Image (cartoon, rainbow, N blue to C red):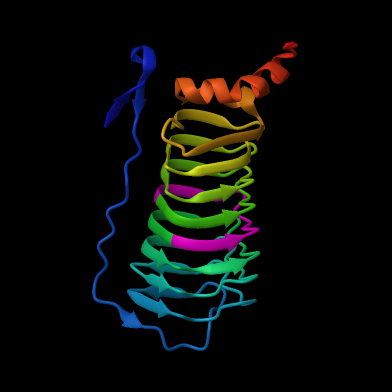
Amino acid sequence: MVRRAAGGTGVRGARRPEVRLPPLVPYDGPGLEPDGDHDGVEFTERDFAGQDGGGARFLDCALRGCALDETRLHRARVLDSVLTGIRGVGTDLSEAMLRDVELVDARLGGVRAHGSVLERVVVRGGKIDYLNLRGARLRDVVFEECVLVEPDFGGARLERVEFVECALKGADFTGAALKDVDLRAASELDIARGVDRLSGAVISTAQLVDLAPVLAAELGIRVE
């Protein structure tokens, strides 16, 4: 899919995941464990606060209404799965892989996802505060109708990433590399740092006007 930006510039749109879950088996275990293997499992309203699921694999799974406060999912792999209504503060998803995943109506804060890989992921609805994606790789990712408060994309690589009716508040793109990133449909675009890294992104004329003071400051232009 190719979208046309102003001036005839082509912007390749993100490929969305097509998750089709098989019949799922309800989870009845005691909790997460390092390097656990979960295939076709449904986790409903489980409290995984403080547990260690580092290196675990979730394939064709559904997590619904689960609590992930300080849950360690370092280097976990979440594949072909749906996460709905999850909540938590300080969830550790550093160096994790999310591929073909739908994250719906999440309420998260202080998520540590630095060095992670997101491929064909949709984040729809909900609110995520202080999302740390430093050094992460995002390809074919859509943030849709959600709120991201002070997300940190420092040093991250974003390719075919879309922000659709998504509010970006105080975003940090310091050192990031962008390619085919579409910000035009963002409901709010507030960039605190790294505005100089927006090469490879497309914004609307109205957004350009809103960003003018930040751009002027970055370029050392005095406006009087």
> Is residue 95 in sight in this rendering?
no
Task: Write the residue at 42% across / 89% down.
Answer: 28
> Is residue 25 in sight in this rendering?
yes
Name the image quarter holding the C terminus: top right
Task: Write the residue at 65% across / 58% down.
Answer: 110
63 vs 167, left or right, is: left
Residue 8: quadrant of the picture: top left
Q: Is residue 221 above or below residue 209?
A: above
The image shows residue 200 at horizontal and vertical percentages of 49, 23
What count of labels does the image hold? 0
Q: Is residue 146 above or below residue 199?
A: below
The image shows residue 193 at horizontal and vertical percentages of 68, 32
In magenta stretch: residue 115: yes
Given residues 195 and 51, the one toward you in this image is 195
Given residues 224 and 161, the one toward you in this image is 224
Q: Is residue 114 above or below residue 194?
A: below
Given residues 85 and 70, the one toward you in this image is 85
The image shows residue 57 at horizontal and vertical percentages of 45, 67
Task: Write the residue at 53% across / 79% down.
Answer: 32
In magenta stretch: residue 78: no
Q: Residue furthest front?
A: 224
173 vs 158, left or right, is: right
Magenta part of the protein: which range? 105-121
Residue 128: quadrant of the picture: bottom right
Residue 63: quadrant of the picture: bottom left
Name the image quarter holding the N terminus: top left
The image shows residue 62 at horizontal and vertical percentages of 37, 71
